[in-house]
């Protein structure tokens, strides 16, 4: 197969580029078009929900997008980002900092161009072309000079079909993941509060117990050494779990006081707990270190509490609220956690350990399924980007 010719975007247009209407967005009203800003565009080029806009009559003809239109961001942090408009997006007007291009479909399919603007080759061109400064920008004239691969239309069509099939599979997997996450959240809310019971435990009571009856604070200070390297852990917000943050030499650590954590510790970030930064220390983080900005708790009543059950329970919204009530401060981002208040608060747990274990194993199985699906999604995304890059730059050819 012969190599593709390289053509300029300006040679493939059926109309000159133009700019969007400079109309102010207003609250949604029936019959008004949506006002497209580049921040309304997802990374895959699809349009997110936006506002309606009142388009002045003098802008009406030029402001509304038509099928096959591509808009490019010409300034700001999103310079180079694009959107391919389809009628399924509804009637849309576009912002004044966007440039609209209409390609000649006999030379360059808009779908092919849209896919090309997500390749590394395109973004390297953007990096070279965008004027540096507080507001990097690319003019319409410079966009006209964008080099674009120019395979035959039939080959463009074949490439669009192939890449679109990958993207369709990715969207379906994303929808499945969203549904699974919603199902898990609903089921966890029901199982962890006793609203749904396993049949074999239906007659067993749930008891109210203070957190302080179940946990005690532990402190394992280390002997400091500026030459030693320390593995530091932290906690993600929204119950994202404890993770290895860095391996850092003592001399590079400003706060010269660290504490050891062990498998089975329950870790709470004093400054971030109101955002769900709390969780169980897993086995592979055993022996790592935290600063004094964390509270380390240990289960002192393993006969009453299955620790993994409490870890699942701590992810519920009502447990976030308990952490908020046990904190003080003038702003949500500056709240400070008070352990004594937290230990006084009460939770309800099953009286039978077997019920706690059954609930935990069910939710943990769902967590593992979600983790596997997320890995599959990431792998599919990586493969899709790799395949698209090869196809859209002609390194791998698709039979037309």
Image: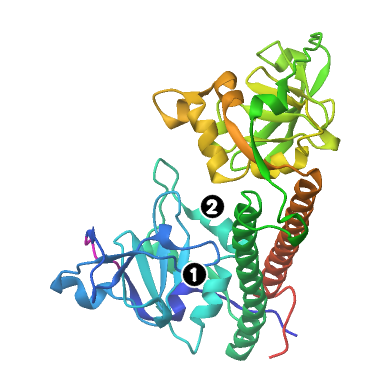
Can see residue 68?
no
Instruction: Give the main secondary structure of the magenta stretch.
Output: loop
Q: Residue at x 55, y 22 (%)?
A: 341
Check if residue 45 falls in the magenta segment: no
Distance from the alpha carbon under mark 2 to that under mark 1: 23 Å
Magenta stretch in the rendered image = 19-23
Q: From the viewer's perspective, is the residue at label 2 or at label 1 nearer?
A: 1
Q: Is residue 231 left or right of residue 137?
A: right
Q: Quadrant of the N terminus?
A: bottom right
Q: Tell me the number on the disc at residue 46.
A: 1
Looking at the picture, tell me which residue is in the foreground, 353 or 25. 353
Mark positioned earlier in the residue sequence (2 or 1)? 1
Q: Nearer the viewer, residue 352 or 296?
A: 352
Residue 224 location (% of width, % of height): 79, 9
- The residue at the far left in this view is 57
Which residue lies under the disc numbered 2? 127
Residue 191, labelled with which disc?
A: none
In this view, 141 is above or below 223: below
């Amino acid at each position: 197969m012969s190599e593709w010719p390289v053509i300029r975007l300006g040679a493939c247009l059926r109309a000159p580029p133009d700019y969007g209407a400079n109309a102010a967005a207003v609250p949604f009203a029936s019959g008004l078009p949506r006002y497209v800003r580049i921040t309304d565009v997802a990374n895959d080029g699809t349009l997110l929900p936006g506002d309606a806009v009142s388009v002045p009559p003098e802008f009406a003809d030029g402001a509304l997008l038509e099928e096959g239109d591509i808009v490019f961001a010409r300034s700001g942090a999103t310079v180079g980002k694009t959107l391919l408009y389809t009628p399924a997006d509804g009637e849309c007007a576009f912002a004044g900092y966007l440039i609209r291009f209409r390609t000649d479909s006999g030379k360059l399919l808009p779908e092919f161009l849209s896919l090309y603007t997500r390749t590394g080759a395109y973004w390297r061109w953007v990096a070279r072309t965008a004027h540096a400064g507080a507001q990097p920008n690319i003019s319409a004239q410079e966009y006209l000079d964008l080099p674009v691969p120019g395979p035959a239309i039939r080959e463009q069509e074949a490439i669009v079909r192939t890449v679109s099939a990958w993207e369709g599979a990715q969207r379906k997997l994303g929808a499945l993941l969203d549904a699974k996450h919603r199902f898990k959240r609903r089921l966890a809310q029901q199982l962890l509060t006793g609203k749904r019971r396993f049949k074999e435990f239906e007659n067993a009571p749930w008891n109210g117990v203070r957190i302080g009856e179940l946990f005690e604070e532990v402190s394992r200070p280390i002997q400091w050494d500026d030459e030693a390297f320390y593995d530091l852990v932290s906690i993600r917000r929204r119950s994202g779990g404890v993770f290895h943050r860095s391996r850092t030499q003592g001399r590079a650590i400003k706060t010269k006081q660290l504490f050891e954590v062990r498998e089975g510790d329950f870790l709470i970030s004093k400054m971030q707990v109101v955002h769900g930064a709390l969780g169980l220390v897993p086995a592979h983080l055993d022996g790592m270190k935290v600063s004094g900005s964390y509270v380390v708790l240990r289960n002192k009543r393993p006969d009453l509490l299955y620790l993994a059950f409490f870890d699942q329970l701590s992810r519920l919204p009502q447990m976030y609220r308990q952490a908020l009530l046990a904190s003080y401060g003038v702003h949500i981002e500056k709240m400070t956690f008070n352990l004594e208040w937290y230990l006084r608060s009460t939770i309800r747990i099953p009286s039978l350990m077997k019920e706690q274990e059954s609930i935990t194993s069910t939710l943990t199985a769902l967590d593992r399924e979600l983790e596997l699906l997320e890995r599959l999604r990431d792998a599919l995304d990586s493969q899709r980007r790799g395949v698209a890059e090869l196809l859209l730059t002609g390194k791998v050819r698709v039979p037309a």
